[in-house]
Image (cartoon, grey):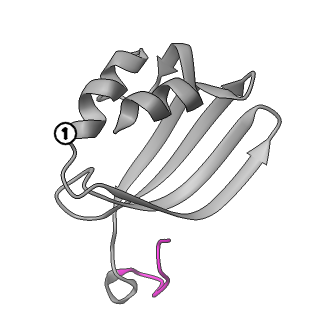
Amino acid sequence: MCSPRCDRYWAEPYVQHSPQMPNGLDTLRTVVPGLEGFSWEPQRVAAQGDLVFTHSIVHGWAPNPVAIVDIFRLENGRIVEHWDVVQDIVTPEASANGNAMV
């Protein structure tokens, strides 16, 4: 699943800032095909210079759906660096403000 996309959209050296994953595309090639029920639902996308930000609902990364903000740095049109913030999704009814997280 990842190999053709990894080679098309990512480039080495790939610097990973997520604390659960090491640097390099070999990690993506190993981890992504093993994710069961994985789906990524981008809700917002923004770009500034060489950075692209996505705010998404992600299924299959954790036991329950999570809200993830991904920050990608691109070089020559390919992803070379990544940061993320992952939060468990709380329903609007359970939040202090009554607003949806995503």
Left/right of residue 91 with respect to residue 10 in the rendered view:
left
Instruction: Tell me the residue that label 1 is attached to.
Output: 34
Magenta extent: 95-102
Residue at coordinates 32% horizontally, 22% vertically from top-left? 27
Asked if residue 94 shows in the view, the reply is: yes
> Looking at this view, is 49 or 39 the one in front?
39
Which residue is found at the position 46% from the left and 25% from the top?
17
Q: How many marks?
A: 1
Residue 19 in the image, given as x and y percentages of width and height: 34, 28
Crowdedness near tag 1: few (<14), some (14–19) or many (≥20) residues, C-alpha within 10 Å? few
| Residue found at the far top of this picture | 13
Farthest-out residue, front: 4
Residue 88: image x %, image y %? 31, 61
Identify the secondary structure beneath mark 1.
helix
Q: Quadrant of residue 44?
A: bottom right
* Camera-nearest residue between 24 and 8: 8
Up-down relation of residue 69 to residue 57 (above or below): above
Q: Position of residue 9 (x, y in %)?
A: 57, 31
In which quadrant is the N terminus drawn?
A: top left
- In the rendered image, the vertical position of residue 100 relative to residue 14, given as above or below: below
The residue lying at 65 percent from left, 27 percent from top is 78
Q: Is residue 91 above or below residue 14?
A: below
Amino acid on which disc 1 is placed = Gly
Q: Is residue 22 at all visible to an observer of this figure?
A: no
Question: x%, y% of residue 16?
Answer: 46, 23
The residue drawn where x is 59% and y is 52% is: 54
Secondary structure character of the magenta stretch overall? loop
Q: Residue furthest right?
A: 49
